[in-house]
Image (cartoon, helix red, strand yellow):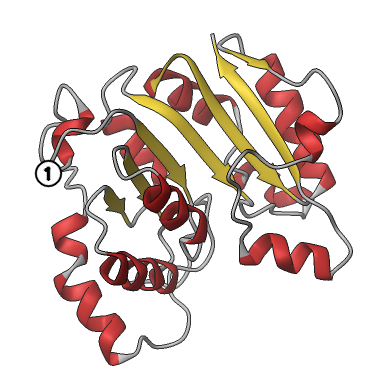
Amino acid sequence: MNDTYEGAFFGRRKGKALRQGQAGRMADLLPKLAIDLDEPAPERLDALFPRPVKEITLEIGFGGGEHLIHRATESPDAGFIGVEPFINGMAKALSAIETGGLDNIRLYNDDAINLLDWMPEASIDRAYLLYPDPWPKRRHWKRRFVGPENLDRIARVLKPGSEFRFASDIDTYVDWTLRHVRAHPCFEWTAERASDWLEPWEGWPSTRYEAKAYREGRRGYYLTFRRL
C-alpha cells in the first residue's frame, strides 16, 4: 500500500508504525465495523447497525476520531458512519470505540467518494467535513474535497432539509467553500449573524486540529448549509 495517493483528496495513508494493540484492532475489530462496498447498499442505511437508529450522521475524514466518538457517545440512539483513509487515525478511533463499547459506529477506511457513490439517495440526516486538508498551494486546489462533483455526491445522499456542516481554520478554504456551496443549486447557507459561523455547533467537543490552529494563531470557522 502506498503512503500517498497522487490526485486523491487526502494525503498520507500511513504514519508511524502501529503498536501491537492498534494493529490487532485493525485486524480484528475493523472488519466487524467496516462497510463492505462489494455488497449492494441496503435500501435503508440503518440496516448497517445492529439495532434501530433514529438518524444517521456521516463524517468525512474524522482524523483521530474525537468528534465522531463524542457524537456517538452523546447520541447512542443515532447511527454514525465515519470515513478516514489515514490508518493511524483509524487505529486511534478503533481504540476509543472498543473502550467505550460503542455499537452505533460504522467505518470506511478509503476514499469517501467511493462510499458516497455507494450510498442510497437521501439516506443521510447530517454530514460533517471538519478541518479537511486545505491543500494550500494553488496547483493543489483541485484536490480540495469541496468542489462541484463532490457537492453533487453529498447533495444526493442528504435528505431534503438536512445539514452539511464544514469547519476549517484556513481563510482561503473557507472562502473557497462558501463560493462553491452557495453556487450549488441544492444548498443554502443558513447563517444570519456572525456568531452563526464564528461559534461551533452545540455540543462541539473540539479536536486536536482545532487546538493546533488556536496555538498557531488561527481560529476556526463553522459553516452550515441546508440541503434544499
* Left or right placement of residue 84 versus residue 109 in this view: right
**Location of residue 165 in the rendering, given as x and y in whole percent from the top left corner:** 59, 34
The residue closer to the viewer here, 206 or 129, is 206
User: In the rendered picture of this protein, how many numbered marks are placed on residues?
Assistant: 1
Q: Locate the C terminus and report the quarter of the image it occupies.
A: top right
Name above or below for residue 5 compared with residue 77. below
Quarter containing the N terminus:
bottom left
The residue positioned 39% from the left and 88% from the top of the image is 17
Q: Which residue sits at x=32%, y=37%?
A: 78
Which residue is at 59% across, 47% downward? 130
Q: Quadrant of residue 137?
A: bottom right
Q: Say which of 33 and 13 sits in front.
A: 33
Q: Position of residue 195 (x, y in %)?
A: 82, 32
| Label 1 secondary element | loop
Q: Is residue 103 left or right of residue 184?
A: left
Residue in the picture at 53% in, 24% down: 163
**Residue 193: x %, y % from top left:** 85, 23
Which quadrant holds residue 115? top left
Return the residue nearer the eye: 218 or 101: 101
Residue type pointed to by label 1: Pro
Left or right, 153 with respect to 169, comes to left
The relative height of residue 77 versus residue 210 in the rendered view (above or below) is: above
Rendering quarter of residue 181: top right
Q: Is residue 61 left or right of residue 22?
A: right
Residue 110 image point, x, y percent:
35, 54
Mark 1, other Cα within 10 Å: few <14 / some 14–19 / many ≥20: few
The image shows residue 89, relative to residue 196, as above or below, that is: below
Dot 1 corresponds to which residue? 50
